[in-house]
Structures are given as structure tokens and as C-alpha cells.
């Protein structure tokens, strides 16, 4: 488990983006060590959790969307939104679903995944490729602006230069897999959690430094303070006057700058953050609708339900099933 990794992004005083990221958590929920024999191809369906892959022996290929990406031994990738993708020894191999492969429990939350080689493959018992794959969960709602801005695929090769700890972590993971000692699976899961967190941090600090939209708004000295306040206290029903005071501007000038920078009114933005928090309270913490409505300051469960459906697109009663 990697908790609050963003606390170390910069020294105090923290900028607005760092303040928002301080509550970000990324927890590994399941890992697979995949021993494969060429030719092979595995299809991973879309899922809510992020996907992580670490290639430990021999180059292979990743298809995300329409494009194929070559991954060499020692490369790692993170798919933050868990998009559907294919891993393969060669792009021409017909993929099989990961769910149809043989799984053997190695340790807590870690499995050995294997499959028979198709006709034409090498002799059984001689793996040509080894992957370490994982599923991870963010504590952010999938509709959070930061999640929406992340690319479909984040590679260590693209970010290692800005995050000097990445090569060392990759080397440590390769060492653990090569030795195959007792407890290696547990150590690998922890290393993978940290590595995924570093990938995201490097992207935030460098990969998205020139991005527009929400990232640019957060980095704006004046509006950034307002967004940080909203995301630090997502259950509060912020008024325009309160937010204008944080920025140190009049109500009208604040509202005008907020719309020009963020792209929507302060009231709309606050309502969206409120409802993303509400969905988290319902889905992850299992709170009753009446309790959530009261925490967010609604006079009745009915008025809360109407607001939730208007912002999220479905009634709050279905949040548990969707999550």
C-alpha cells in the first residue's frame, strides 16, 4: 500500500497541486506472475482498477487502443484507468482472455498465471517470457479531473529521467524475480505499489507540466488556492463569497476568473466535487443515503438524490452496484 506519496513532491510551503495530491492513495489489490511460452498473447478486459505490467524477461508487445508498443525486459507500464489492452510475444498472435488462464496461488494476493503454448510453440516447461502484472485501486473517483487527464498508458521509460528512483526500483524487482526466494511475491507487490506511485508523481511534476485545462487551473497562483480548498474539504457546501475571500477578490471578479480558467462556474464545480465525494461515501464506505445527504448539508434525502442524479447521471442508490 502506498499512502500519501505526494507529501514528498516538494518542500513546504506546498503548491496547490501538491495539497490536492496529498490525499491520493494507490493500493495494490492483486498481482500475477505470468510465465509464458512463445507464441502467446493475452487480452486484459477493461476494469475500474488500474493495471500494471513489469516485463522481466525478453521483449514483448502491448496494444492499447489501435497502437502496438514494444516493451523490453526491465520496462514497466501503468494503465491508470484500466483500459482494455493486449500483451503479446508478437502482434500477430491471436489473444486469449486472461480469465481463461490457469492460476495458482503463490502468496497473499499474488498468483502464478500460465497457459499452454499454442501449436508451434517451444517445448512445455520452458517459459520464454515472464511478466509481473497487477491491479491497483486509486482512492480518487474515476471522474476526478486528475484521473481524466492521465494518459491511457504511462511508461517508466518516458519518466525515468525525471524520477531517479525508478531505475533502482526496477533493478530491485528484477533481482527479486531472478532469485525467486521465499517472500519474493510479497516484496514485489510492495515495490510495484511504490513504482506506480513514482510513475504518477513524475507525470504530475514533468509529464503534465505543460498541460492545459484542470492542471493549468490548479497551478494558477490565485485559482489554485481555491481549487485546493475545495478538494481538501470536498463535503463542504462552499459559497461563492467564501471562495472569493480565499482568492482575495470581489465576488464578481472571482467568478469571472474562475469560469475563464476552469471552464465552469464555481457553483457547478463545487457541486461536482460534492457528488464525487458522495459517490465515494456510498460506494466505498457503505453509508446510507440519509447520512450522506446530512453530511453534505442537504435538507432531505430526496433533494440530495435529485442533485446527485443531475451531476453524476444516475441515482445514488445505484452507486454501490456501479462501483
Image (cartoon, rainbow, N blue to C red):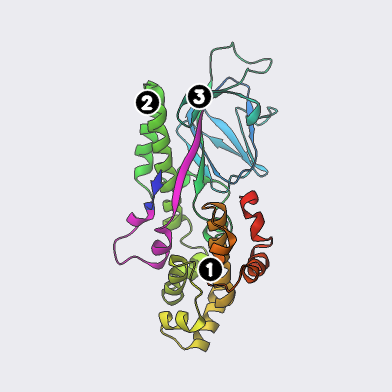
Tell me, yes or no, whether the highlighted magenta stretch contains residue 306: no
Q: Residue at x 29, y 61 (%)?
A: 11
- The spot of residue 276 in percent (x, y) is 56, 62
Query: SS for tag 2?
Result: loop
- Residue beneath label 3, please? 105
**Mark earlier in primary sequence (2, 3):** 3
Query: SS for tag 1?
Result: helix
- The spot of residue 262 in percent (x, y) is 55, 73
Front residue of this view, candidates 115 and 303:
303
Give the CA distance from mark 3 to mark 1. 44 Å
Chain part drawn in magenta: 6-33
- Residue beneath label 2, please? 183
- The spot of residue 30 in percent (x, y) is 50, 35
Instruction: Say if residue 196 shows up in the picture.
Output: yes
Front residue of this view, candidates 222 and 144:
144
Front residue of this view, candidates 202 and 92:
202
Left or right of residue 113: residue 24 = left
Q: Residue at x 54, y 63 (%)?
A: 292
- The spot of residue 311 in percent (x, y) is 64, 67
**Mark earlier in primary sequence (3, 1):** 3
Give the CA distance from mark 2 to mark 3. 13 Å
Which residue is farthest top?
123
Badge 1, how many Cα within 10 Å: few under 14, some, many 20+?
Answer: few
Left or right of residue 218: residue 11 = left
Mark 3 in CB contact with mark 1 (< 8 angstroms): no
Q: Which mark is residue 294?
A: 1
Tell me, yes or no, whether the highlighted magenta stretch contains residue 16: yes
3 vs 1, front mark: 1
Query: SS for tag 3?
Result: strand
Amino acid at each position: 500500500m502506498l499512502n500519501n506519496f505526494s507529501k514528498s513532491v516538494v518542500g513546504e510551503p506546498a503548491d496547490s497541486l501538491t495539497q490536492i495530491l496529498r490525499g491520493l492513495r494507490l493500493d495494490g489489490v492483486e498481482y500475477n506472475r505470468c510465465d509464458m511460452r512463445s507464441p502467446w498473447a493475452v487480452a486484459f478486459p477493461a476494469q475500474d482498477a488500474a493495471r500494471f505490467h513489469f516485463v522481466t524477461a525478453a521483449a514483448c508487445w502491448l496494444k492499447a487502443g489501435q497502437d502496438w508498443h514494444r516493451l523490453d525486459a526491465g520496462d514497466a507500464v501503468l494503465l491508470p484507468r484500466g483500459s482494455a489492452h493486449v500483451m503479446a510475444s508478437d502482434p500477430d498472435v491471436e489473444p486469449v482472455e486472461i480469465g481463461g488462464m490457469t492460476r495458482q496461488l503463490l502468496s497473499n494476493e499474488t498468483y502464478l498465471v500460465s497457459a499452454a503454448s499454442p501449436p508451434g510453440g517451444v517445448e512445455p516447461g520452458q517459459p520464454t517470457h515472464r511478466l509481473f502484472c497487477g491491479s491497483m485501486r486509486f482512492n480518487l473517483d474515476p471522474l476526478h479531473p486528475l484521473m481524466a487527464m492521465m494518459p491511457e498508458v504511462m511508461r517508466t521509460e518516458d519518466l525515468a529521467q525525471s524520477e531517479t528512483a525508478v531505475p533502482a526500483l526496477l533493478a530491485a524487482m528484477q533481482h527479486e524475480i531472478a532469485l525467486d526466494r521465499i517472500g519474493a511475491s510479497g516484496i514485489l507487490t510492495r515495490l510495484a505499489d511504490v513504482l506506480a506511485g513514482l510513475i504518477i508523481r513524475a507525470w504530475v511534476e514533468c509529464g503534465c507540466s505543460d498541460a492545459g485545462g484542470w492542471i493549468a487551473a490548479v497551478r494558477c497562483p490565485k485559482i489554485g488556492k481555491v481549487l485546493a480548498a475545495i478538494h481538501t474539504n470536498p463535503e463542504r457546501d462552499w459559497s461563492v463569497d467564501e471562495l472569493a475571500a480565499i482568492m482575495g477578490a470581489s465576488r464578481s471578479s472571482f467568478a469571472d476568473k474562475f469560469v475563464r480558467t476552469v471552464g465552469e462556474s464555481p457553483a457547478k464545480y463545487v457541486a461536482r466535487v460534492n457528488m464525487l465525494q458522495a459517490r465515494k461515501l456510498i460506494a466505498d464506505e457503505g453509508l446510507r443515503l440519509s447520512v450522506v445527504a446530512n453530511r453534505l448539508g442537504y435538507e432531505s434525502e430526496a433533494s440530495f438524490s435529485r442533485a446527485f442524479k443531475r451531476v453524476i447521471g444516475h441515482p445514488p442508490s445505484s452507486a454501490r452496484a456501479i462501483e
